[in-house]
Image: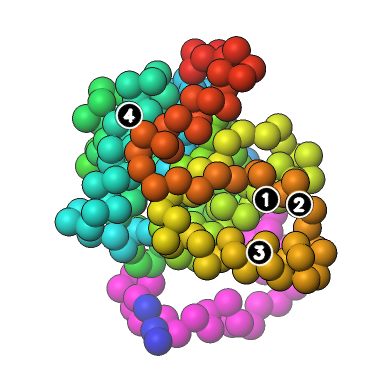
């Protein structure tokens, strides 16, 4: 299936295979470094001032009428009442719900947008001075991990799973300090987590039993926010640290 690129032309995904000589490759790589640096600098300078925030992930395809959209909005609202801001991917669906809830709670509402040929457009509930655009997924991922005090993971697709497993891997390998990871909707997550337990842990021994404690599955907004609160209360920390 083809998609339209930014110019409106049809693309079948084979553009990356277009022939380039060695000089063109080296030149593009060299100039690309400056673009990458600029995204890191802009992200660091902006997000270093946002205060404690929790990132909310989930599908861009969830409609505002969906019960899980309303649940994500309520979680975001409750987080702001506890002193946290909200970071999302800045797009529609669950991301919009997160920013909408933060906006309703008069809390910090951050959007880390990514330039995509489809789906992604900034939603209307992001603070004007906290709406960032990225070309590179890996730079954007650094911002989520570096400036989040926790992850709330709503039902989503490959992108949501990507963010979830990267965070678990970074914590498991001690590349970052542990923070709470909350999976919302046990009915959605139970199949995947059952497979992780039965296959990765018990049958193949590819993970340790303690790795199953790196995330918590909940079903309500109150439960999700309480996991975040309990994690920091045990260290006598508050959202303004």
Q: Please identify, in this view, whether the residue under mark 4 or under mark 1 is nearer the observer.
A: 1
Residue wearing tag 3:
196
Measured in 3D between alpha carbons, the distance from the residue under mark 4 to the one under mark 1, in whole angstroms, is: 26 Å
Q: Position of residue 20 (x, y in %)?
A: 66, 77
- Front-most of 2 and 167? 167
Q: Secondary structure at mark 2?
A: helix
Q: Residue at x 26, y 23 (%)?
A: 106
Measured in 3D between alpha carbons, the distance from the residue under mark 2 to the one under mark 4, in whole angstroms, is: 32 Å
Residue wearing tag 2:
209
First reached walking from the N terminus: tag 4 or tag 3: 4
Measured in 3D between alpha carbons, the distance from the residue under mark 4 to the one under mark 3, in whole angstroms, is: 30 Å
Q: Secondary structure at mark 3?
A: helix
Relative horizontal placement of residue 185, taking residue 105 as reference (left or right): right
Q: Secondary structure at mark 1?
A: helix
Q: Residue at x 36, y 42 (%)?
A: 220
Q: Secondary structure at mark 4?
A: helix
> Is 180 contained in the magenta span?
no
Mark 2–mark 1 CB contact (< 8 Å) = yes
Residue wearing tag 1:
212
Instruction: Please determine whether, in this image, residue 50 is positioned above or below residue 6.
Output: above
């Amino acid at each position: 299936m083809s998609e339209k690129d930014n110019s409106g032309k049809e693309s079948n995904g084979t553009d990356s295979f277009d022939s380039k000589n060695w000089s063109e490759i080296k030149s593009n790589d060299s100039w690309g470094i400056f673009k990458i640096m600029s995204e890191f600098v802009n992200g660091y300078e902006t997000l270093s001032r946002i205060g404690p925030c929790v990132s909310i992930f989930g599908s861009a395809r969830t409609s505002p009428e969906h019960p899980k959209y309303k649940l994500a909005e309520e979680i975001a609202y409750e987080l702001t009442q506890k002193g946290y801001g909200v970071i999302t991917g800045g797009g529609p669906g669950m991301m919009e719900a997160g920013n909408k809830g933060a906006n309703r709670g008069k809390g910090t509402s951050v959007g880390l947008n990514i330039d995509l040929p489809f789906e992604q457009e900034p939603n209307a509930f992001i603070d004007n001075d906290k709406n960032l655009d990225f070309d590179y997924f890996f730079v954007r991922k650094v911002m989520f991990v570096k400036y989040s005090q926790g992850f709330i993971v709503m039902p989503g697709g490959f992108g949501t799973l990507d963010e979830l497993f990267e965070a678990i891997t970074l914590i498991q390998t001690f590349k970052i300090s542990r923070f709470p990871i909350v999976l919302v909707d046990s009915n959605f997550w139970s199949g995947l987590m059952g497979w992780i337990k039965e296959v990765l842990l018990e049958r193949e021994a590819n993970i340790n039993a303690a790795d199953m404690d790196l995330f918590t599955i909940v079903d309500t907004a109150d439960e999700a926010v309480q996991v975040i609160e309990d994690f920091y209360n045990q260290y006598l920390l508050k959202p303004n640290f």
